[in-house]
Every structure is written in C-alpha cells, then in structure tokens.
Amino acid sequence: MTDPISDYLTRVRNAIKANHRIVEIPSSKLKKEITRVLFDKGYILNFKFEDVANHQGVIKIALKYHPVTKTPAIRTMKRISRPGLRNYTGVDTMPRVINGLGIAILSTSKGVMTDKEARLNNVGGEVLCYVY
C-alpha cells in the first residue's frame, strides 16, 4: 500500500455510506493522531486502540450520526496531500475549509493538529485532509 492515509479516509467514507456504526482500521502513529483530532472536534463518537499479535494493532472508530435524522457528522473527507504531490502550507497561506465550518488536518513539526490550532501556534506544515 503506497498511501495508508488515503486508505484510512476511504475506509471511514465507505463505512459512513454503508451506515456502519463501527469501522476497523490498521493502526499507525499518524492514523492514531488523526483519529484523536477527529474525536476532539466531535466528528466521531469514540475510538479504541487495540494491540494484536502482529504488533500493528487496530483502531476501532465508533462513527457519529444525528439521533433523529441519522445523518452522519462527517459529510466529506477529502485527501489533499498525497505521495505524488505533497501540499505544504505556511501560516500566511493556511487553508480555511468552508469559511471555517470544516477543519483541515495538518502534520506540523509540533504534531498533528487542525488549521485553527496551527494558526494559534504559528506553525505551518503538510495539509493531510479536509473534513466537513
């Protein structure tokens, strides 16, 4: 697999389209941090990191839906930076997703964070994906 982050996003998108409650994803440090950001911003209900015998582990994500209308909290997840074309940004050119209603997840020198947190910390980095 050449792009594990795209695989992560695709698994979550497919689970949302199929109205699944839980999705299992192979674990890595970057995927754990992206999951933590999604949980902190309220896009997923809960998550759990499980270690298995092959030392890679699994991330179990409980997806969040509206209780009455059953619409998912995540409408779109779009990969921005990919292995063939990396997309880096500075503080001055930081993207705003849907005029601040969505989030851009960045990998910075101070860890994985949203675009708003990166502006506050005055750091730039690689734009991983947009979530709204």
Image (cartoon, rainbow, N blue to C red):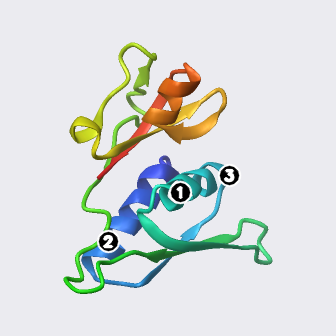
Per the model, the C-alpha gap separating discs 1 and 3 is 17 Å
Q: Residue at x 23, y 36 (%)?
A: 99
| Mark 2 residue crowding within 10 angstroms, few (<14) / some (14–19) / many (20+) | few
Using residue 76 as the reference point, say whether residue 91 is left or right of it. Answer: right
Residue 128 position, x and y percent, is 44, 39
Per the model, the C-alpha gap separating discs 2 and 1 is 22 Å
Which comes before the other along the chain, label 2 or label 3? Answer: 2
> Which residue lies under the disc numbered 1?
40
Per the model, the C-alpha gap separating discs 2 and 3 is 22 Å
| Of 117 and 109, the residue lying toward us | 117
Q: In the rendered view, tell whether residue 87 sits above or below residue 10.
A: above
Which numbered dot is residue 29? 3
> Which residue lies under the disc numbered 2?
14
Q: Are marks 1 and 3 in contact (CB under 8 Å)?
A: no
Amino acid carrying label 3: it is: Lys
Secondary structure under badge 2? Answer: helix
Using residue 126 as the reference point, say whether residue 78 is left or right of it. Answer: left
Q: Residue at x 68, y 52 (%)?
A: 29
Amino acid carrying label 2: it is: Asn
Q: In the rendered view, tell whether residue 86 sits above or below residue 6.
A: above
